Each structure stands twice: as C-alpha cells, then as structure tokens.
Image: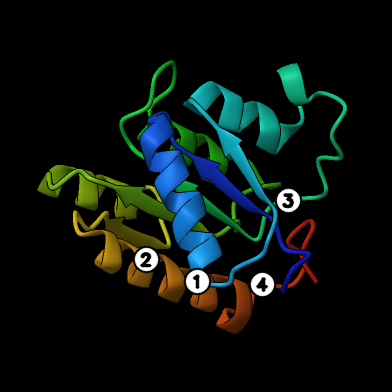
Amino acid sequence: MKDKIILLVEDNPDDVKLTLRALKKSNIANAVVTAGDGAEALDYLFATGIHAGRDPRAQPAVVLLDLKLPKIDGLEVLRRLRADPRTRRLPVVVLTSSREEQDVVASYDLGANSYIRKPVDFDQFIEAVRQLGLYWLLLNEPPPGVPGMP
C-alpha cells in the first residue's frame, strides 16, 4: 500500500496541512504529491510543464480533487482526465467544501468516482480521510492496465 501515490489537488494551504495531518493520524504513510491549482495537477498527470521530467506511466493510485481551484477549476481537470485514454480510468475523488447540488451532479456526470464534502469538524475529517484512504489504497481493485498500478 505504501508505494501507491496520492495526488492531492488543493489550493488552500490550510486544507493541504489538514489533509496531510489527517492522513498521518490515520496511519496512511503513502507519498502525497500536492498540486496547488488545476494547471499544476494536469502538468503532473501528463508529465508536462514543471513536471516534464516525470515518468507519465507512474500515475497516482487516487486523485483527491478540490473543485474551486485557480487557473483551471476541478471540473475542467476532471473533464480533461476523462477525455484522455492515459488517465480515463484513474480514480478521482472530489474532496471539496462545496455544497452546491450542481457541483455534485457535474462531478458525477464528468466521471468522478466519489464526491465527499469536507466535514467541518476535525475528528470527522480525520475519520473521512481514514476511510477514504483504506478504501482507495487498500480495498479498491483498480482496472487492469491503468498506468502505474498493478
């Protein structure tokens, strides 16, 4: 489980710290790559821009994607991931504070695997991240042929 990378796409530094703390507190020791906006996330996933030297076949086990992002918003990131055969089947969990029904619908319409609203309470957030990590990193069986996954 440790060798599976998590890509956290989040622009709020406090939410990044909170998520990393929740992962650590939940004993999820996987490497976490953070992207502060949608453009950086796409650069990482497609090994372009600042991530041009990265092996594009080594994909994360799961992408935790916020929706309200600078440069390129989360829904557009999701749209581009699903449009490309290299990332079409990559597990994407929308992890956001948005309570807008249209964001939930649009996320699933664009192929999100899950939509989780960030709990306000820290203990509930830790529990949500723990369950998310256990499911996507340990229990979930990825489709065969997904780059970077067994």
- Residue under the point 57% across and 84% down: 139
- The residue wearing badge 2 is 126
User: Disc 2 and disc 3: Cα gap in Å?
Assistant: 25 Å
Q: Quadrant of the C terminus?
A: bottom right
Q: Is residue 46 above or below residue 109?
A: above
Residue 26 spot, x, y in % from top left = 50, 71
Query: Is residue 141 or residue 2 the one in the foreground?
Result: 2
How many residues crowd mark 3 within 10 Å: few (<14), some (14–19), many (20+)?
A: many
Which disc, if any, is residue 59?
Answer: 3
- The residue wearing badge 1 is 26
Query: Is residue 79 or residue 63 the one in the foreground?
Result: 63
Query: From the viewer's perspective, is the residue at label 4 or at label 3 nearer?
Result: 3
Q: Earlier in the sequence, mark 4 or mark 1?
A: 1
Q: Earlier in the sequence, mark 4 or mark 3?
A: 3
How many residues crowd mark 2 within 10 Å: few (<14), some (14–19), many (20+)?
A: many
Helix, strand or loop at label 4? It is: loop
